[in-house]
Every structure is written in structure tokens, then in C-alpha cells.
């Protein structure tokens, strides 16, 4: 029987791997044992807190990881180094036929290098996305991972074009759609039934009308001047729309370090809360009037939900969300954020659903893997 190792490491990986593992399980249940593919789930431990990791396993019915490398936080090189040393041992012991990595986090790159060095077939899901910004560590992770992958699954056509421009042979590239959207569509009804805003006990006068904010990119949160400029924008926005801010641990640390607690505050109608579970975050977005973010996945999720999304970056590796979806690139300058907020609040645009974002990407991926056995 063939064996595949699935790698997860950080929060945005869990909802991408879940639908592929589910599709594989269905394949195994409906084919003869000789055609089964055994799945092994490895968690690098890049994210380890209950609210950055454990809650996702419970809600997304992901199996408990077979192996957890427990690498934890550190500088990027420490993190990548520790993952590589730990994962190499796993590969030598497990001897899989395939390693499947998703997205663009440090765990993605580290495990990809190990697989390649040991001559194991490497599969990259969410391949080909390019922001063109090499100061983003995710961009470095994407380019390097794609350059050594044997099978590259893309979420949008721009991915295929980028990969071909980089000289990757077209037979290796398969446009399959978006696994993150598989998960969203699967759990949307369940999330709709929650009352997350109420559960958070936010005492806001404008109870049902609110915006959601997430921020974690070093380019937005590591400089005191930039983070306080963003805070200033949200003080203005908070006067017309309360802002719920599920705060990433690194952002929370920076807010404290720069003494910005009185800016991102209840008094300014900015309600800072701990990171939310998958279903609570989905519920919060479903009912929001607008979302502001520097995340990659949230740009895609709001596109499917048709909720206007202001992305606090100058570029995006997910251009289909701007061309067809509800995403607006606004950067991180105070007046640009405020102006975009008031402009988009007035706008009544129709958004389109990108091709193959239909809840079936996981199944397409499994059938492609099976067809190359
Ligand atoms: C990582 C990814 C980023 C992704 C993000 C989603 C890389 C290069 N970056 O960034 O692409 O969008 O995850 O969250 O891989 N921490 C905790 N608990 C945890 C994990 C982290 O408190 O479970 C804190 C630690 O202080 C840590 C910091 O968050 O130093 C940053 O974590 P790290 O994994 O280095 O990167 P993220 O900023 O989360």
C-alpha cells in the first residue's frame, strides 16, 4: 500500500489539509485495499497554542496528528532548521511515497526541502501564488517550494501562469480550485447557527453592525509608527462602525510593547479579543459589514461570502479576489484606510465566485494523486 504524509504546522494549514484527508478517506473506503493510500498526519508544532492549533482539530474533525514535532516559536531560521531535523527523522522512519505540503508557511518550506533531499515525491497545494514582494517570507517559501515540487495544485489560473513563467513544466501543474473554500462551504451552515458576537459579550451600541479586523504581518505590526498609524485609522472607523479585532499573539505583544493599548481599545469601539476558533471566526465574518485584514486566506473567504474586504497591503498573491471578488488593496497608510472604508461602505458592487471554488478541490487533488500511482 502506498503512503502519503500530510504536513500541517500553522493555523492556515489546518483548514486546507482537512478536505484532502477527507477525500482520501472516501477514496480508501470505495476502492480495493491494494489501491488504498495510507495517510500519516505530521504536525510540526509551529503553532501550538490552544487557540492557534488545538481548536481547529476539534472543529474540523481532523484526526489527531500521528506525529508532533513540537518545534514551537523562534527566528525563522531556527524554526525551519528544527523542523528540517525533526521531519527528516520522520521520513527516514516512515518511508512515504509522497509528502503533501500546503500554503506558504515556514513548515511548508522546511518539509518540502526534506522530502526533496530524500527523493520523495513532493506535492504542493496552493502552488503558484505570487505577490512579487520578496520581503515577505511567505513569498520566499512559495517560490522555493514550487521550484522543487513534483506535483503543483493551483487555486486560481494566475498560479498556472506564474509557474509556467518560472519554467515549471505544465504537466506538473493542475488547476483544481481552492481547498480552503471546500472547508468554508462545508462548515458555513454550522457556523451560521452560532452567536459569536453575543458570546464575546461586546457591549456595543450598534449591536448588529460591525467590522472585523485581523492583523499579523511583520510589515504592519513590527513598526511602532506603522501600527500606531493603523490604530489611528481604526479610531476614526470605530466612530461609525465598531471593530471586532481577534488579535494574533504576535500583534498583541507588539501593541503592548508600543504602548498602544489605549488606541486599540474598548473606548474607541475597537474590541480586542483572543484568536477565535474556525467556526466562531467564520460566524463573525458571515455577519460583518466589512472585514479588514492582512491575511491571505481571509481575502479568499470574504470573496466567497461577498463581504467587502479591505486588505492592508499594497499587493496580493491572490489577484482573483480583487478582479472578481470583494477584495480591495488599500495599504497601511492611515488616510488610505479611512478613505477606502468610507468609499467601500457606500459601494454596492456585485462579486463573482472564482472558477472551481466549489467545494470539490480536495476530491480533484486526490483523484490526480491516484492517477499518478
Ligand atoms: C505564520 C506564518 C504566516 C501565517 C500565520 C498565520 C510563516 C513565515 N508565517 O506567521 O504566513 O499567515 O502563521 O497565523 O510561517 N505564537 C503563539 N502561539 C502559537 C504560535 C505563535 O503565541 O501557537 C506567537 C509566538 O510569539 C511567535 C509568534 O506568535 O513567536 C509568531 O509565530 P510564527 O509561527 O513565527 O509566525 P506567525 O506570525 O504566526
Image (spheres, rainbow, N blue to C red):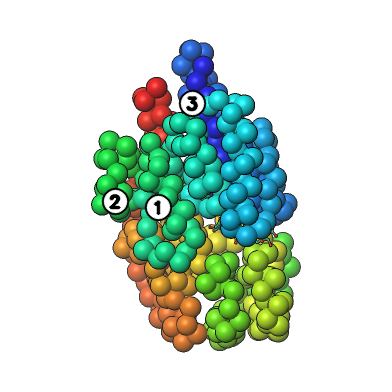
Q: Nearer the viewer, residue 372 or 364?
A: 372
Tell me: residue 58, above or below residue 217. above
Q: Residues within 10 Å of mark 1 (few under 14, many from 20)?
A: many
The dot on residue 143 is 1
Query: Rounded to the nearest whole Å, what is the CA distance between mark 3 and mark 2?
Result: 26 Å
Q: Nearer the viewer, residue 62 or 224?
A: 224
Question: Is label 2 in contact with label 1 (beta carbons under 8 Å)?
Answer: yes
Judging by the rendered image, the residue that carries numbered circle 3 is 97
Is label 2 in a helix, a strand or a loop?
A: loop
Q: Is residue 234 visible?
A: no
Residue 214 location (% of width, % of height): 57, 67
Residue 207 location (% of width, % of height): 64, 73
Q: Is residue 330 visible?
A: yes
Q: Residue at x 32, y 40 (%)?
A: 173
Is label 1 in a helix, a strand or a loop?
A: helix
Is label 3 in a helix, a strand or a loop?
A: loop
Residue 105 location (% of width, % of height): 53, 53
Tell me: residue 282, above or below residue 328. above
Query: Rounded to the nearest whole Å, what is the CA distance between mark 2 and mark 1?
Result: 9 Å
Question: Between disc 1 and disc 3, whose residue precedes?
Answer: 3
Respond yes or no on whether mark 1 lies under 8 Å from ligand 1. no
Question: Between disc 3 and disc 2, whose residue precedes?
Answer: 3
Judging by the rendered image, the residue that carries numbered circle 2 is 166
Q: Residues within 10 Å of mark 2 (few under 14, many from 20)?
A: few
Amino acid at each position: 500500500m502506498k503512503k502519503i504524509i500530510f504536513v500541517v504546522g500553522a493555523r492556515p494549514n489546518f483548514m486546507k489539509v482537512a478536505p484532502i484527508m477527507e477525500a482520501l478517506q472516501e477514496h480508501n473506503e470505495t476502492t480495493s485495499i491494494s489501491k488504498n493510500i495510507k495517510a500519516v498526519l505530521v504536525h510540526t508544532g509551529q503553532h501550538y497554542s490552544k487557540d492557534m492549533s488545538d481548536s481547529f482539530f476539534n472543529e474540523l474533525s481532523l484526526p489527531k496528528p500521528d506525529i508532533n514535532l513540537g518545534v514551537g516559536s523562534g527566528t525563522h531560521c531556527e524554526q525551519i532548521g528544527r523542523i528540517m531535523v525533526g521531519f527528516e527523522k520522520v521520513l527516514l522512519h516512515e518511508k512515504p511515497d509522497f509528502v503533501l505540503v500546503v500554503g506558504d508557511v515556514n513548515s511548508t518550506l522546511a518539509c518540502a526541502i526534506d522530502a526533496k533531499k530524500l527523493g520523495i515525491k513532493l506535492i504542493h497545494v496552493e502552488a503558484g501564488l505570487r505577490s512579487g514582494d520578496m520581503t515577505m517570507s511567505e513569498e520566499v517559501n512559495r517560490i522555493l517550494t514550487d521550484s522543487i515540487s513534483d506535483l503543483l495544485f493551483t487555486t486560481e489560473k494566475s498560479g498556472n501562469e506564474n509557474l509556467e513563467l518560472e519554467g515549471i513544466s505544465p504537466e506538473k501543474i493542475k488547476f483544481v480550485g481552492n481547498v480552503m473554500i471546500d472547508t468554508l462551504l462545508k462548515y458555513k451552515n454550522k457556523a451560521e447557527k452560532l452567536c459569536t458576537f453575543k458570546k464575546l459579550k461586546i457591549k456595543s451600541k450598534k449591536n448588529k453592525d460591525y467590522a472585523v479586523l485581523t492583523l499579523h504581518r511583520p510589515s504592519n505590526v513590527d513598526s511602532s509608527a506603522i501600527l500606531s498609524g493603523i490604530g489611528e485609522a481604526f479610531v476614526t472607523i470605530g466612530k461609525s462602525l465598531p471593530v471586532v479585532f481577534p488579535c494574533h499573539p504576535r500583534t498583541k505583544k507588539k501593541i503592548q510593547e508600543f504602548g498602544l493599548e489605549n488606541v486599540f481599545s474598548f473606548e474607541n469601539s475597537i474590541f480586542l479579543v483572543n484568536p477565535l476558533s474556525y467556526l466562531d471566526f467564520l460566524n463573525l465574518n458571515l455577519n460583518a459589514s466589512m472585514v479588514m485584514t492582512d491575511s491571505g486566506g481571509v481575502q479568499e473567504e470574504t470573496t466567497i461570502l461577498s463581504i467587502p474586504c479591505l486588505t492592508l497591503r499594497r499587493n496580493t498573491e491572490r489577484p482573483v479576489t480583487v478582479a472578481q471578488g470583494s477584495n480591495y488593496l488599500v495599504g497601511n497608510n492611515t488616510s488610505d484606510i479611512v478613505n477606502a472604508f468610507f468609499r467601500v461602505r457606500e459601494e454596492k458592487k456585485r462579486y463573482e465566485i472564482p472558477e472551481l471554488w466549489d467545494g470539490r478541490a480536495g476530491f480533484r487533488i486526490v483523484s490526480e494523486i491516484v492517477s499518478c500511482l
